[in-house]
Image: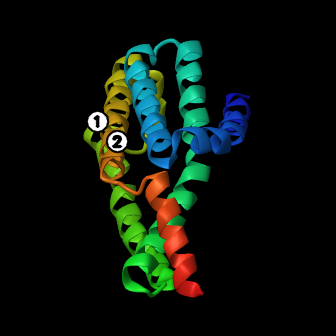
Amino acid sequence: IMTVIKGEAYTPGMLAAAPLTNKLGKKRICLISLSVQTVCLVLMLFLYKNYVLLFICIFIKEMVGAVSIIYLPAMKADMMDYQQYKTGDRLEGFIEQSGILIGSIVTLATGYFLPVVFKTYGLTNNYDDLYNEAFRTPLVRAVIIYAIFGTLLSIIPFIFYDLTEEKRKNMIAALKLRAI
């Protein structure tokens, strides 16, 4: 039941994404979204024993994270436009394939990370151990700490995103003039 309810967290996030992005700008809404997700994760570190409060944090984190479904493709399109503005060429296919390649490598590397963490904390194949609070607590805390670290790392590239809405507007105007 919690999984179904958590899945519905995306709906308000996606509905609010476009108006918020238009009002605040892509970079700002991105940084706000990632910051709120980080705060939720930090709260989870202290509230993980209370399932109701933990679930509320998860719900809010998912709802705020759903905003990325709107701003990430928009930011990617802006980067493609910027690349065309700077070079005169549009290399979307190359950039997409490079992103898929890098993303696959990162996914493969991080996919091995959680099993290593689980093994480090003694979880190998006896999942009944998770019913033991003394066994489960350090593992849960470690996973939350790694999630906080990962979310903080994901903020870094967006800090350097400097294509403001005004710069984008001027860039698109220049591209339209070049097309004529």
Q: Residue at label 1? A: 121
Give the image location of residue 121, x and y in percent: 28, 36
User: Which residue sits at x=57%, y=77%?
Assistant: 176
Which quarter of the picture shows residue 85? bottom left
The image quadrant of residue 51 is top right
Q: Is residue 172 above or below residue 65?
A: below
| Residue at the spot 52% in from the left edge and 55% down from the top edge | 72
Q: Please state if 118 lies on the left or on the right of 172 as rendered.
A: left
Position of 80 with respect to 56 (left or right) is left
Q: Secondary structure at mark 2?
A: helix
Seen at 56% across and 35% down, the residue is: 64
Quote the CA–CA distance across marks 1 and 2: 5 Å
Residue 24 image offset from top left, x and y in percent: 53, 39
- Are there few (<14), some (14-19), or many (20+) residues within 10 Å of tag 2? some
Q: Which mark is residue 56?
A: none
Task: List the residue tagged with mark 2.
Answer: 118
Amino acid tagged 2: Phe
Q: Are marks 1 and 2 in contact (CB under 8 Å)?
A: yes
Task: Using the rendered view, name the quadrant where residue 173 is placed.
Answer: bottom right
Does residue 31 sit above or below 112 in this rendering? Answer: above
Residue 147 in view: yes
Side of 165 where 156 appears, left or right? left
Q: Quadrant of the C terminus?
A: bottom right
Q: Which of the image's four quarters has the N terminus?
A: top right
